[in-house]
Amino acid sequence: MSVLEMSHRGKDFMGIAEKAESDLRQLVGIPDNYKVLFVQGGASTMFASNCYNLAGASDSADFVVTGAWSSKAQKEGEKLLAKANIIASSKEQSFTTIPDVNEWKFTEGSKFVHICSNETIGGVEFKEVPNVGDRVLVADMSSNYLSKPIDVEKYGIIYGGVQKNIGPAGMGICIVREDLIGNARPGTPSMLDYKIHADNDSMYNTPPCFTWYVSGLVFAKLLKDGGLAAVEQRNIEKANVLYGAIDGSSGYYNSPVDKKYRSMMNVPFTLAGGEELEKKFLAEAKAEGFEALKGHRSVGGARASIYNAMPKEGVEALAAFMKDFQARNA
Amino acid sequence: MSVLEMSHRGKDFMGIAEKAESDLRQLVGIPDNYKVLFVQGGASTMFASNCYNLAGASDSADFVVTGAWSSKAQKEGEKLLAKANIIASSKEQSFTTIPDVNEWKFTEGSKFVHICSNETIGGVEFKEVPNVGDRVLVADMSSNYLSKPIDVEKYGIIYGGVQKNIGPAGMGICIVREDLIGNARPGTPSMLDYKIHADNDSMYNTPPCFTWYVSGLVFAKLLKDGGLAAVEQRNIEKANVLYGAIDGSSGYYNSPVDKKYRSMMNVPFTLAGGEELEKKFLAEAKAEGFEALKGHRSVGGARASIYNAMPKEGVEALAAFMKDFQARNA
């Protein structure tokens, strides 16, 4: 019987599920007073769950808006909270930077502070955990989960979909400090109530077993390969190759992103030669086997997503192609 | 690039997704005025979604309770509706039958009538679509989806998880009449709002691509194998073999379920010899390779789940084992 067929309540799958959690706990160093929840619906569902679990309908929360995803989280907050305060935003900078934490205007009495630790479209990434004092920091880590060590204790909730660095799309992982569980407002849908998932070991209903299984294989592999410090080292090297190619091109390629906050996962860049040349670049790159390099329509240009699974060789090959393209077209 | 890696917004996966929907539409005969939504969170999430989309916070809905799943749906209704009326129940019969539709006490002004078309634990199944007049009938078909033809037009919403008959756990399919979309109450979480899924072709966020892909393969196979009428014919034959073995055992094996409503998917049975003999039966069956035959703890005994993917040979082997066990232990 394959993992695609077995009952999630059977001994075999329970063993798979438990090992996945214990490996993840070891990999990240998750303290005992944090629960790990394997949930469905992706970060978009957890945008809502966070509001239901941390705030009443007449409460507010604070949002730092640094791109498309943190903006979506804030908009969901507008639906479900009395107020979803934007306490800092880089919208005026076209989401190419992250507002300095010293300038965030926290709201008295708001129930949590929400950030997105990496924005896939703009390509900006928090480099340090922002100091929010004794406020509850909630972070959407969908797109840089397990790309580097995580200082769990600085967060109330860490959450995200698995589909970038961890496993096949269809599962989210939520790491929640225990004291934040059990306070969901009345009328919270059961599947959005973290206490229900915690009390049922993430099996209140049938979980996405295959995704859970593959995620477990990834946790085990990352442990074997040296843990998150080693993952970070590889990601730094990969990012350096690519940003080096951009910065070393004498302005032929350009990164629009504030150097302090350049993402290790998503590297958007433009060609000074303009849109027509960008089209040519993307077409030739595709012909050479570089898939999915087109930038998001809202930003244009190119974007290389170099998640954990992308080997350094892939990034080096792209850098070499960029150099060659420049030589032929400059 | 495998389907586990490709972008859900890329041409390749879009083609997979579209073909899956069009094959499902052909397989079931889904009228044009029904949307097909591929969603996350399973039926347990849709218990809530149905309330949000069909009823306001001060509205009520009617629930027919015939077992564990319809009971869960009703309890979710209690959280999210002004009233979740139990208009008929077989609880006093230990969920071994289905209350006659002529005795259902519909509530004036309630927004929908909810049934579960097959209960996995009790093993009861609706044999006809209940006539609820011009009320909106909502059916959880998780455990008998695609096991027989579906008369879609008699329903407002058909929904269910895919994990029994369709594909790997982690996706739900919701077939919704168009006029029921777009009326979600204020404060509906985005991921529970059917209009958001409909407007985004079920890609408001990253969908469970692999499950969607495998489900598509199953739709194509069922079409090739003669459609749902042929599926039903095979399921009738399978169920007849097993119920025949029970009924032909001179009372050695017993089905607790009202013959009119015996499920074609889940066949619970007990041994007149009592619990100790049942334990022996289950142990020997497991040793012979019959997995997952233990009845649910709330019912006891044995239960054979013979979903679409179980071949007739499997059921025949079980019937032969039952006969042999009886001969050796009677």
Image: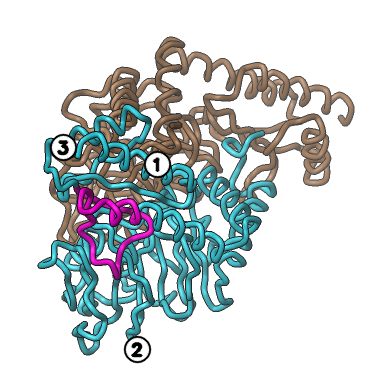
Chain colours: A cyan, B brown
Q: Which residue is mark 1?
A: B208
Separation of disc 3 and disc 1 at Cα?
36 Å
Residue A22: image location, x then y, percent: 63, 63
Q: Is residue B214 above or below residue B232?
A: below
Q: Quadrant of residue A33?
A: bottom right
Pick whichever, A213 or B125, lies toward us.
A213
Instruction: State the SS at label 1.
Output: loop
Among the two numbered marks 2 and 3 on one chain, the one whose residue lies closer to the N terminus: 2
Name the residue: 18% across, 76% down.
A88
Does the magenta segment cover residue A26?
no
**Quarter location, residue B134:** top left
**Residue at label 2?**
A133
Label 3 marks a residue whose chain is A
| The magenta stretch spans residue A257 | yes
Distance from label 2 to label 3 (Cα)? Answer: 48 Å
Q: Amino acid at mark 1?
A: Pro
- Density class for disc 1 (Cα within 10 Å; few <14, some 14-19, many ≥20) is many
Q: Amino acid at mark 2?
A: Gly
Specify the subunit that label 1 lies on. Answer: B
Q: Is residue A63 above or below residue B73?
A: below
Q: In the image shown, does A326 or B256 lie closer to the viewer?
A: A326
Stretch of the chain drawn in magenta: A243-270
Look at the numbered disc 2 and give the secondary structure of its residue: loop
Image location (x, y in percent) of residue B162: 44, 36
Q: Amino acid at mark 3?
A: Leu
Q: Nearer the viewer, mark 3 or mark 1?
A: 3
Work out how far the residue at label 1 is from the one at label 2, CA to CA, in angstroms: 37 Å
Relative placement, left or right, of B218 versus A7 is: left
Q: Indicate which disc residue A277 carries.
A: 3
Left or right relative to B273: residue B69: left
Circle 2 crowding by C-alpha within 10 Å: few under 14, some 14–19, many from 20 = few
